[in-house]
């Protein structure tokens, strides 16, 4: 198989995982709040990471280096993931995914301040295109602006922070180490946030499979995407990843009778164009 075809197969796994997580999160909303969902997701994620580290012999790669960065990264991801889970329960799934695609564009805006990277003209244009796309997804007359749209758009900012701090960690830390602290720290955050009122709900027998699905799918989505990026350039992977939007739109239509709105499609296309413009420009400069 060609590298492109292999990358496409990995991305199909990523798309299926993200979509499954969104559906499972919506199904659990009737019995668990977002903090409880994150707590159980992190619990199952921790069990999976520990098991895989033991089986593959990568346990010794886990160390305490860069702990402040781990803490900041996982606080950002925990916040973004909670906002994302809330958004999937109150607005159409396609709208959530469209706004989530602005994360790389927020990286462009924030990286000069956090990573010391230069803001070029092309990067600036890509960021402006992403902002225009957000306005269109939220509707030009702002009639569609609500708590779900705000939380989905906000989650993209926290995911951008996660991306940037992950980039910093990968310079010195292994994937096993990063995933271990991702799951264990967020498990602690989840226990504190879910139990602050002294009442943590247990998943029902019907909800337990969805909790397990979220835990497995969350890790699998990022694992598949990382493998795809390792064997194919981003200019190939990003267009494949964008298939997530029409895929989740169809899922939302079939499972929840959600209409496919032209504003979401148009805004998402502009967001995608901004992302692709930036990646294409960066690739040309490296070559």
Image (cartoon, rainbow, N blue to C red):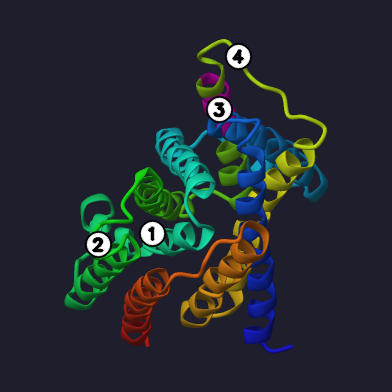
Compared to residue 168, the image places residue 33 above or below, namely above
Q: Which residue is mark 1?
A: 103
Dots 2, 4 in contact, CB < 8 A: no
> Residue at (61%, 72%) from the top-left corner?
228
Q: In front here: 44 or 51? A: 44
- Which quadrant would the N terminus be assigned to in this image? bottom right
Determine whether the residue tagged by mark 2 lies in a helix, strand or loop: loop
User: 10 Å neighbourhood of mark 4: few (<14), some, or many (≥20)?
Assistant: few
Q: In front here: 73 or 260? A: 260
Mark 2 or mark 1: name the one nearer the start of the chain.
1
> Residue at (20%, 71%) from the top-left corner?
124
Question: Between marks 1 and 3, how big is the CA–CA gap?
Answer: 23 Å
Select label 1 or label 4 by which is in front. Answer: 4
Measured as percent of width and height from the top left, residue 68 is found at: 40, 33
Q: In front here: 273 or 172? A: 273
Mark 3 or mark 4: name the one nearer the start of the chain.
3
Q: Which residue is mark 3?
A: 190
> Residue at (33%, 76%) from the top-left corner?
270
Question: Between marks 2 and 3, how big is the CA–CA gap?
Answer: 33 Å
Specify whether 232 is left or right of 266: right
Specify whether 194 is left or right of 156: right
Specify whether 170 is left or right of 201: left
Residue 189 falls inside the magenta stretch: yes
Q: Which residue is mark 2?
A: 117
Give the numbered dot on residue 199. 4
Dots 1, 4 in contact, CB < 8 A: no
Dots 1, 3 in contact, CB < 8 A: no
Select label 2 or label 3 by which is in front. Answer: 3
Mark 2 or mark 3: name the one nearer the start of the chain.
2
């Amino acid at each position: 198989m060609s590298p492109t075809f292999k990358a496409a197969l990995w991305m199909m796994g990523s798309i299926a995982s993200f979509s499954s997580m969104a559906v499972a999160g919506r199904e659990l909303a009737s019995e668990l709040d977002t903090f409880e969902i994150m707590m159980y997701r992190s619990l199952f994620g921790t069990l999976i990471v520990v098991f895989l580290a033991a089986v593959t012999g990568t346990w010794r790669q886990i160390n305490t280096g860069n702990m402040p960065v781990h803490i900041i990264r996982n606080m950002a991801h925990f916040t973004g993931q909670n906002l994302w889970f809330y958004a999937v329960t109150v607005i159409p799934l396609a709208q959530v995914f469209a706004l989530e695609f602005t994360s790389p564009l927020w990286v462009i805006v924030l990286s000069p301040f956090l990573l010391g990277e230069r803001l070029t003209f092309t990067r600036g244009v890509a960021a402006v295109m992403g902002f225009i796309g957000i306005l269109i997804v939220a509707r030009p007359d702002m009639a569609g602006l609500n708590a779900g749209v705000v939380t989905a758009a906000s989650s993209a900012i926290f995911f951008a922070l996660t991306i940037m701090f992950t980039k910093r960690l990968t310079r010195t830390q292994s994937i096993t180490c990063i995933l271990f602290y991702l799951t264990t720290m967020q498990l602690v955050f989840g226990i504190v946030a879910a139990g602050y009122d002294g009442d943590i709900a247990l998943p029902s027998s019907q909800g337990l499979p969805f909790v397990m699905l979220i835990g497995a799918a969350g890790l699998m989505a990022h694992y598949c995407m990382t493998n795809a990026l390792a064997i194919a350039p981003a200019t190939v992977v990003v267009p494949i990843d964008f298939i997530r939007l029409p895929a989740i739109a169809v899922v939302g239509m079939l499972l929840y009778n959600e209409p496919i709105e032209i504003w979401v499609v148009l805004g998402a296309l502009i967001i995608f164009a901004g992302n692709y413009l930036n990646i294409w420009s960066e690739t040309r400069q490296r070559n």
